[in-house]
Every structure is written in structure tokens, then in C-alpha cells.
Amino acid sequence: MTKTLVAQLPPMSRADLQQFEREGGVWGKQREIRRKQLTVSGVVALAATGFGFTYMKSRRNTWLVIGMTLPLFTGFGAVAGQAIGVTSYPSVVSNQETTMMRRVWWAQQCSKSWSKSS
């Protein structure tokens, strides 16, 4: 028989997330890796958007054409950036497992503070 406990936990602050990265073992390390992967993806998407704008403007296209093609450049940049990020910073555990372990860790932290205040 499994027991399910449902609790409304307070949101984690930036300091709590940084503490999880330090104390969370391999799951904390994965959270840091995932953040780096997403940063690479965002930077490449932004660079592709900038390149697309510059390229389309240099070809003397109208604003309508520029506006219609920028999402394509952005999408391509996001996909390429994700591939580059995952290759540059390989994952050590799955992101779903990391999310679950972060929640478990946060529940333990909250129970410690609740038991101290009682």
C-alpha cells in the first residue's frame, strides 16, 4: 500500500535553489547543467534572430517580410542552441528525476524549519 502526501509548499527563492545546487548531490549538479544548456540555447536563438534581422534587412526586404521570417530564424536558433547546449554540457541524470528530487529536498527543508518553529 502506498501513501501519498500532498502539501502546499512555499515557493523556493533564488537562494534556496542555489543551496539545492550545492547540497543536492547529482541532482543539484544536473540543475546547474540544465541552466547552462538553456543559457546556450537562448544565446544562440538570440544570435540567430539578430543574424536573420541583419541578413533580411541587408537584402532590402519590407518590414512585413522581415517580421514573417524572424520567427523562423529564432526557431532555428533555439533548436540549434539546444543541440549545442546538450552537446557542450551533457546531462548526468534526467530532468524529470531532478525536478522530483528538488521537490523532495524542498519538502525536507520546509519540514525542518516547521519542526524548529514548533
Image (cartoon, rainbow, N blue to C red):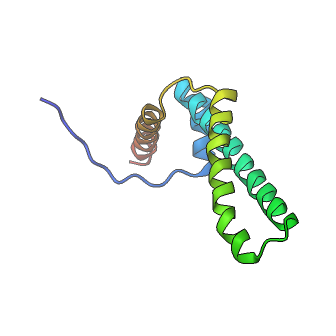
Displayed quadrant of residue 103: top left
- In the displayed orientation, state which residue is furthest to the right: 58
109 sits to left or right of 60: left
* Quadrant location of the N terminus in the rendered image: top left
The answer to whether 35 appears left or right of 2 in the picture is: right
Toward the bottom, the furthest residue is: 63
Query: How far from the left and from the top, in percent, is residue 99?
Result: 45, 38
Identity of the residue furthest to the left in this view: 1
| Residue ID at (62%, 31%) | 86
Against 103, residue 92 (above or below) is: above
Measuring 44% from the left and 44% from the top, which residue is drawn there?
110
| Rendering quarter of residue 56 | bottom right
Q: Position of residue 52 (x, y in %)?
A: 77, 58
Q: Nearer the viewer, residue 57 or 108?
A: 57
Q: For this view, does 5 lie left or right of residue 29?
A: left
Observer-nearest of 26 and 59 = 59
Q: Position of residue 53 (x, y in %)?
A: 79, 63
Expressed as whole percent of the image width and height from the top left, the position of residue 109 reads 46, 40
* Count of numbered tags: 0
Q: What residue do we see at 69% from left, 71% from top?
A: 67
Q: Is residue 10 above or below residue 22?
A: below
